[in-house]
């Protein structure tokens, strides 16, 4: 069901800049109007400056005027092997800022896809 979005996430992962962890992540974020924004992780020798794939995709979309999001697909792993890559806490909080509770997070481990809602992966999220 999410094959296309997963394929775009894989393409985004090809652009990952991850020389320190070697763990490459790609994300494909779909807006409610059907536009897809790609994101990859971008590391830095000052490690805490690293930006995750998911936040790259969100910040690209938001900086281009998008505010309503439907779903995101995320793929990650070392070399050619994908493993399940659930979003980190910081990325979940960014999702919580811009998405409804029923926003979908699609995870693909190279074999199976798992779909969660934002409410499932971030219960009791902080929002002003
Ligand atoms: N990373 C992501 O891009 N997204 C996640 O959801 C988890 C972790 C990146 C950050 C870092 O470049 C590498 O994966 C290893 O932590």
Image: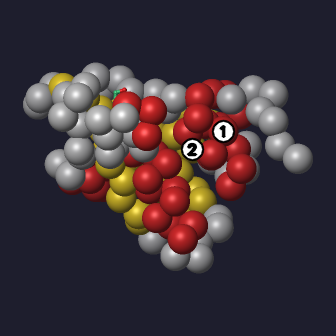
Residue at screen point 57% across, 44% down: 104
The answer to whether residue 33 shows anywhere in this view is no
Q: Which mark is residue 93?
A: 1
Question: Where is residue 96, by image quadrant?
Answer: top right
Left or right of 57 in this view: 120: right
Residue at screen point 41% across, 63% down: 37
Residue at screen point 52% across, 76% down: 64
Does 83 sit above or below residue 117? above
Q: Residue furthest bottom?
A: 65
Secondary structure at badge 2 equals strand
- Spatial distance from mark 2 to mark 1, Cα to Cα? 14 Å
Foreground: disc 2 or disc 1: 1
Question: Where is residue 124, by image quadrant?
Answer: top right
* Image region (quadrant) for ligand 1: top left
Q: Residue 55: horizontal and vertical position, in percent?
A: 49, 48
Q: Residue 88: horizontal and vertical position, in percent?
A: 52, 29
Q: Residue furthest front?
A: 46
Q: Residue 24: horizontal and vertical position, in percent?
A: 25, 36
Q: Quick check: is the Cβ at mark 2 less than 8 Å away from ligand 1?
A: no
Secondary structure at badge 1 equals helix
- First of labels 2, 1 by sequence position: 1
Q: Which mark is residue 114?
A: none
Q: Residue furthest right?
A: 128
Residue at screen point 23% across, 44% down: 17
Q: Counting other residues with Cα less than 10 Å from the Cα at mark 1, is it few (<14), some (14-19), or many (20 or more)?
A: some
Q: Residue 49: horizontal and vertical position, in percent?
A: 43, 40
The answer to whether residue 128 shows anywhere in this view is yes
Residue for badge 2? 104
Does 98 sit above or below residue 49? below
Q: How is the image coloured?
A: secondary structure
Q: Counting other residues with Cα less than 10 Å from the Cα at mark 2, is it few (<14), some (14-19), or many (20 or more)?
A: many
Left or right of 17 in this view: 73: right
């Amino acid at each position: 069901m999410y094959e296309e979005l997963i394929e775009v996430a894989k393409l985004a992962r090809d652009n990952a800049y991850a020389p320190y962890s070697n763990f490459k992540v790609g994300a494909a974020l779909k807006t409610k109007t059907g536009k897809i924004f790609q994101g990859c992780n971008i590391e830095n020798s000052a490690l805490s400056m690293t930006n995750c794939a998911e936040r790259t995709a969100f910040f690209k979309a938001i900086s281009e005027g998008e505010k309503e999001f439907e779903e995101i697909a995320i793929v990650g792993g070392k070399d050619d092997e994908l493993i399940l890559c659930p979003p980190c806490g910081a990325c979940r909080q960014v999702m919580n800022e811009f998405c409804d509770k029923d926003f979908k997070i699609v995870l693909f481990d190279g074999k199976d896809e798992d779909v969660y809602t934002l409410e499932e992966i971030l219960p009791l999220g902080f929002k002003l």
